[in-house]
Image (tube, rainbow, N blue to C red):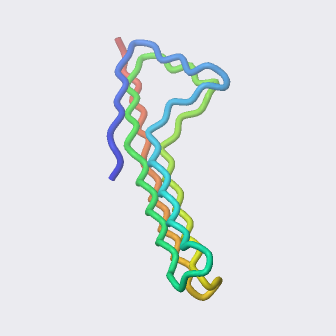
Amino acid sequence: CGGILAIYAKKIINHAGATISANGGNGGAGGNSPTGTNNGGGGGGAGGNGGILVLVFNQYINNGTATASAGTAGAGGTGQPTPTRDGTAGTAGTAGTIYQFRVSL
């Protein structure tokens, strides 16, 4: 599970082109086997899960984006001889959740 990013403010301004994010990390690629060997490629790393983004505000001006995206899967490494010994790609993470709470003052 990803982390939690909580923002508590009277006024949150997310300008155009800006991003508030609690995204999961991408998985690393598996290692490649050297040419001329008879080895398999390394498996790709799994993507991290998106986190939880909590916004608590009285006024929210959102011209940008807010995300809690999943991390992507890492590619499998290349084996030798190819393609029969290529490593398996990792799995992608799952998307997180965004909660928004407007409070009156």
Instruction: Tell me how many marks there are.
Output: 0
Farthest bottom residue in view = 84
Farthest front residue in view = 36
Q: Position of residue 8 (x, y in %)?
A: 35, 21
Q: Position of residue 33 (x, y in %)?
A: 54, 73
Q: Residue visible at 60% across and 88% down?
A: 84
In the displayed structure, would residue 57 be above or below residue 3? above
Q: Residue visible at 48% across and 67% down?
A: 91
In the displayed structure, would residue 72 be above or below residue 82? above
Q: Position of residue 63 (x, y in %)?
A: 64, 24
Viewer-side residue, 66 vs 40 = 40
Q: Residue visible at 42% across and 17% down?
A: 58
Horizontal placement of 26 versus 16: left or right? left
Q: Residue visible at 51% across and 20% down?
A: 60
Horizontal placement of 6 versus 40: left or right? left
Quarter of the image with the C terminus in it: top left
Q: Position of residue 90 (x, y in %)?
A: 48, 68
Viewer-side residue, 50 vs 103 = 50
In the displayed structure, would residue 82 be above or below residue 7? below
Viewer-side residue, 64 vs 104 = 64
